[in-house]
Amino acid sequence: MSGEKDAKTPAEGAVKSDKRKQSLYFPESMLEEIKDEAARLDRSLSWIVQRAWKLARADIKKLPSVDDLGDDDAESGPGA
């Protein structure tokens, strides 16, 4: 009866949504801004964060990795 198991798989070309949960922590002021935008757009917090990631990921990929920074750069980088 392995045919029953196959019936549960998504149709070819269908997108399977991954619903894994992850806790993310934001500064309170940033979270309030996200909540305000979610209310304004009548969307969930999750939708707002996912959309923001999609819009920003090209810029984020341009940032140097920790390995790309020299020893001197790491000490004078952001937050130093």
Image (cartoon, rainbow, N blue to C red):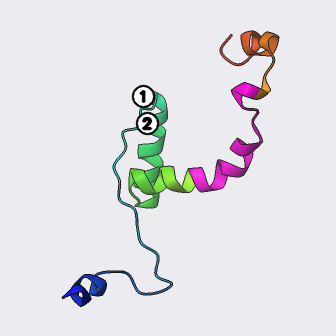
The stretch of residues the image draws in magenta is: 53-67
Q: Is residue 69 above or below residue 71?
A: below
Return the mark for residue 28.
1
Residue for point 78% across, 12% down = 71
User: Gap in Å between the C-alphas at discs 2 and 1?
Assistant: 5 Å
On-image quarter of the N terminus: bottom left
Residue for point 76% across, 32% down = 64
Residue located beneath label 2 in the image:
31
Comparing 20 with 80, the one in front is 20
Q: Position of residue 3 (x, y in %)?
A: 25, 90
Left or right? Give the position of 11 relative to 53: left
Residue for point 23% across, 85% down = 2
Q: Are marks 2 and 1 in contact (CB under 8 Å)?
A: yes
Task: Classify mark 1: helix, strand or loop.
Answer: helix
Q: Position of residue 32 (x, y in %)?
A: 43, 37
Query: Is residue 62 highlighted in magenta?
Result: yes
Query: Is residue 39 highlighted in magenta?
Result: no
Overall secondary structure of the magenta section: helix
Given the image, on which type of amino acid does mark 2 rest? Answer: Leu
Given the image, on which type of amino acid does mark 1 rest? Answer: Glu
Badge 2 crowding class, 10 Å Cα cut-off, few under 14, some 14 to 19, many 20 or more, is few
Number of numbered tags placed on the structure image? 2
Comparing 76 with 42, the one in front is 76
Q: Position of residue 73 (x, y in %)?
A: 80, 15
Q: Is residue 71 above or below residue 20?
A: above
Left or right? Give the position of 17 relative to 51: left
On-image quarter of the C terminus: top right
